[in-house]
Structure formats: C-alpha cells, structure tokens
Amino acid sequence: MIDNYTILTTFPYSTEAQITKSKLEDEGIAVMLLDEKTVDSDPLISQAIGGVKLLVSDSDFEKALKIFNAIRPYELDSNNNPIHCLSCNSSHILIAPLERKNLFHMLFPFFEKTKYICNDCKTIF
C-alpha cells in the first residue's frame, strides 16, 4: 500500500471519514484518505472497492486507535440503549463480520442473523 501508513478503518462515505480525519489531525496524527475521490464521484461503487480508507502513520497507529475507539459510534438496541457485552459488560459493541458458513448465506447474506462483537474483550454473541 503506502509506505509507513496503515489502514485504521474504512467508511462507506467520505463525509464520515472527513470527520474522523479532522479529529485525528487535531490530535497531531498524520492521516491520509484513500479512494475518497473515487467514492465521491460514484457512491454506488463504495462497497465494491472497500470504501474510503483512513490511513494513519505507523508511528501514530496506537494513539490513533485509542482516539478512534473513544469517538466511534457503538451499537444500540431498539430502545436506543447501549448493548452490553455478556462477558465483560462493556458497552463498546460493534456488529461482527458475517461468517457466511454455507452456500445459502453466501448467496443471501441478509438472511444471516446479526451477531455482535465486544471491542474490548472480542467476545462474539
């Protein structure tokens, strides 16, 4: 990829990436956006190319990760209350990646049940 930079996260649209980029730059972290103009020119291809990639300097990666984890949105239940981890009771819950264990779920991923992952202890439930 780009020497001395690592992908911190990806975003489906550049507006979300710009907000996070601004926060990290305010903290003195070297940040770059990759594929921002491509997604802006045709938002429908965002998923096909992996979205807008937010890259941070390798030397600032740990600091950037801590800041990003503090400001990122976490999942809420249907009543807009934080979801808590079953193991550590943390409210830092994200949607877990799809497993697509069988052909049916590969062809129709929207039928796979949503699972959550704790961003602190990595428990999937």
Image (cartoon, rainbow, N blue to C red):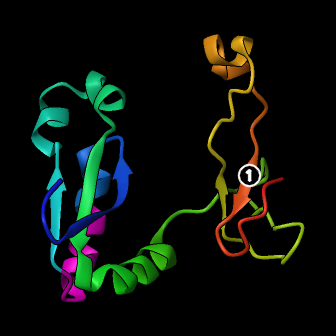
Residue 92 on the magenta span: no
Up/down of 36 relative to 110, above or below: below
Residue 24 on the magenta span: yes
Q: In the picture provided, is 120 more to the left or to the right than 22?
A: right
Q: In the picture provided, is 41 more to the left or to the right than 26?
A: left
Give me the residue at 42% from left, 77% from top.
65
Residue range in magenta is 19-29
Q: Nearer the viewer, residue 38 or 121?
A: 121
Residue 85 placement (x, y as % from top left): 82, 67
Give me the residue at 71% from left, 66% from top.
122
**SS assignment at label 1:** strand
Which residue is denoted by mark 1 in the rendering? Answer: 116
Give me the residue at 78% from left, 47% from top.
78
Give me the residue at 84% from left, 76% from top.
89
Residue 9 placement (x, y as % from top left): 38, 58
Q: Residues within 10 Å of mark 1 (few under 14, many from 20)?
A: some
